Amino acid sequence: MSAIGELTTLKRRKGPLSAAEKKANGRDNKAAYIFLLPWLVGLVAITIGPMLMSLYLSFTDYNLLQPPEWTGLDNFVRMFSDARLHNSLGVTFTYVFVGVPLQLGVALLIALVLDKGLRGLPFYRSVFYLPSLLGGSVAVAILWKQIFGTTGLVNQALALVGIEGPGWISDPSTALGSIVLLHVWTFGAPMIIFLAGLRQIPVMYYEAAKVDGASTLQQFWRITLPMLSPIIFFNLVLQIIGSFQSFTQAFIVSGGNGGPSDSTMFFTLYLYQKGFGQFDMGYASAMAWFLLVIIGVFTAINFIAAKYWVFYDD
Amino acid sequence: MPLFPRSNAAGTNDSAAASSSGARPRLRKTAFVAAAAAVVMALSACGGGATAQKDGGPVELRFSWWGSDKRAQVTQAAIAAFEAENPNIKIKPEYGDWSGYWDKLATQVAANDAPDIIQMDEKYITEYSTRGALLDLSKYSIDTSKLDEAALNAGKGEKGLTGIAAGINAATILANPAVFKAAGVALPDDKTWTWDDFERISAEVTANSPKGTYGAAAYGTDEASLGVWLRQNGKTLYTSDGKLGFEPSDIAEWWANLKELSEKKAVPTASEVVEAEAAPLDQSGLATGKNGLAFWWSNQLPALEKAAGSELQILRFPSTTGKAADAQLWYKASQFWSASSRTKHPEETAKFINFLANSEKAGQALLADRGVYPNSDVRAAIESKLTPADIKVVKFIDQIKDELGEAPAPPPKGAGAIQEIVKRYTSEVLFNRLSTDDAGKKAVDEMKSAIS
């Protein structure tokens, strides 16, 4: 409380500070910066430094083994005519725009069910959350590969009812779908956030609606969805940003090559291949910055669109 | 409701802050010291580990290779033998699978953190050596007098001798006799068989085997089998001036043959082929008894036999004419011992490479895992130690000596990307997403730009 008290005093003070007070403030700041230093060093050395370096590299021809050579916008121009890059954009967009809505839809559905006050809720919550912790991991991606293989669990189950399933992850027409499914399966994190959001909606709205004779569906459309829209928005922004950058699942499931036939060649995977597989780190850096711009644009669109559908109750 | 209620408590705090300001400076000083201490501790924690190496003290060298578990075991034994002779040199092994090996090495070299001793492949040696990442070993005391001449030349380039051949091998087809026996089909005579025989026999095995077992593995997952095919048709993978040695129509023909094999069910389905690509050696179709025939390098036979738990047989490639001399095989340096050009201990590194190449003790540990020993003395000395599997390999290499074609041109810079291109378009063809002609054109375009 005292810190907040101090904050309000600072705000309320009018007129210039005295010399002694300025000195005291300066010392305060110095101590604060020194406390911040370990984090600051990390930020500069591990995040900002490499980012600036990669920005520089994106304008160079850099093969990892020899010093980079300045080539100006060459890398960016090359992206226009790189058919595999265009394909990788297609794969990534499909993954994001199919995977994210599906995942959020499932997350909301399960959250609604759990919100009804089941017995043993903490247990179910944990069970549904578990895939979120595991889904991004290498182990699960390997497991996925086994389950969806030509002789995997899925096809064994299908064989019981007389269907001969394809090699889900080894057939170009179904491989991306299998990875999208893996993404949908990790709905736990948004589900927990939805669940918290649902708990925030005051019961009185539902009671009033019930008195007025609104059906369950009407209650969902008129009360739950609008009241939950800030949470939906939050999940949407996070998931879209995260999905654009997803790498591990495709890398493991396809054995690192984005195959079969580039059908799971995510943008990030292609970037990795260019940089580390084909010694084209300059181009890979340019791709990374291009991805940053794409994510920035979609996040901006999200925020602009949010004005029209997100409802803040304050 | 505002987050922080602005009640009249703020007013009372106002006076409290003013009255306590006398006690503040000391507190601030304490905070200052505490912060400084925290920073110092954090920084010193980061900087640990880097201890200066004293002259004459033990030298630690890092040695990286790719390969199977069996290779790790024999290599560790060779390291132990070297360390026993040289107590001042410690060798730290770093090993893994082929697929991750090159990504890791590229990153390490870029980060100026390359291992001192690097197991190198012919696909990448030009890439690394022309860019100055490898040490010219001819400047150090490594005895090359006993090494096979062709193998020695394979490690020479414009930047000197950047690789010492670790072994000699050849492209082969390995057969699993158990699969043939179960299908009631006789093993082919590899001195006379043609590609038509290959197709017929494989299809026959598939037809007489349980579901999921095929007469042969598909080729097309790497460029070695393409190289054989091209050589048999008067072309080569690369020319001596570092260009592609074939036309789109040549590779299209190769794929057309594969498609025919696939349609006759001589090889697995497209999906199964894709899955097999990712499988490590000990889970390959040949080792698990799912394939009767498969394309492997000769030195991989012992590891595959170990994984399969049964005997395998080495066969020559089929030819177009039915004459073994037209199979156009060649001796390949299975891999090279190379050294990082930035090693801090070039003398010790060279000493270790010299040991690996010329010491009988190294030979007794490594045997034929990396192919037949290029050093003739070592080869003779370890003959009695060889396992039955090793002996098969050595015998095969010996047998084909007079049938060999011309030595192929070394892969040019950028050749490391070719395998991936071949693999990708092979699956495009097998899944009927591209015609063999279109795949040929596109693949050749990509290959040309990769090695330009």
Image (tube, coloured by chain):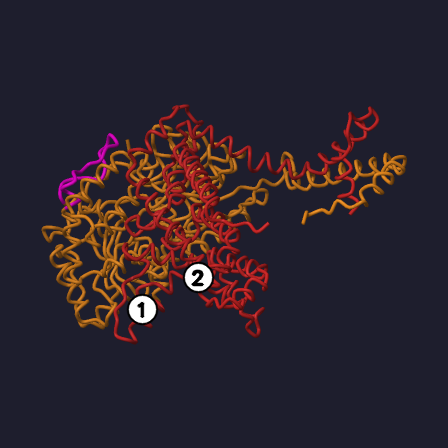
Chain colours: A red, B orange
Q: Which residues are magenta?
A: B233-252
Position of residue B72 relative to residue B128, above or below, is below
Q: Is residue B55 left or right of residue B4?
A: left
Q: Picture quarter containing residue A40?
A: top right
Is B249 magenta? The answer is yes
Chain ID, mark 1: A
Q: Secondary structure at mark 2?
A: helix
Side of B131 relative to B321 (left or right) = right
On the question of residue B134 being in view, the answer is no
User: Is A119 located above or below residue A261 in the figure?
Assistant: below
Determine which of the numbered discs, if any, sits on residue B133 in the image. none
Residue B288 on image: x %, y %: 32, 65
Q: Is residue B282 left or right of A133 when viewed as pictured?
A: left
Q: Residue at x 43, y 36 (%)?
A: A293
Question: Does residue B169 appear in the picture of this structure?
Answer: yes
Determine the residue located farthest toward the front in the rendered image.
Answer: A212
Q: Is residue B325 left or right of residue A179?
A: left
At x 56%, y 62%, the residue is A205
Instruction: Work out how far the residue at label 1 is from the one at label 2, CA to CA, in angstroms.
Output: 24 Å
Question: Dot 1: within a 10 Å radius of its alpha carbon, few (fewer than 14), some, or many (20 or more) residues?
Answer: many
Task: Write down the residue under mark 2.
Answer: A106
Report x, y in % for residue B83. 54, 47
Residue A155 badge? 1
Q: Main secondary structure of the magenta part?
A: loop
Q: Amino acid at mark 1?
A: Asn
Quadrant of the image containing the C terminus of chain B: top left
| Circle 2 chain | A
Percent position of residue B207, x then y: 17, 69
- Which residue type carries mark 2? Val
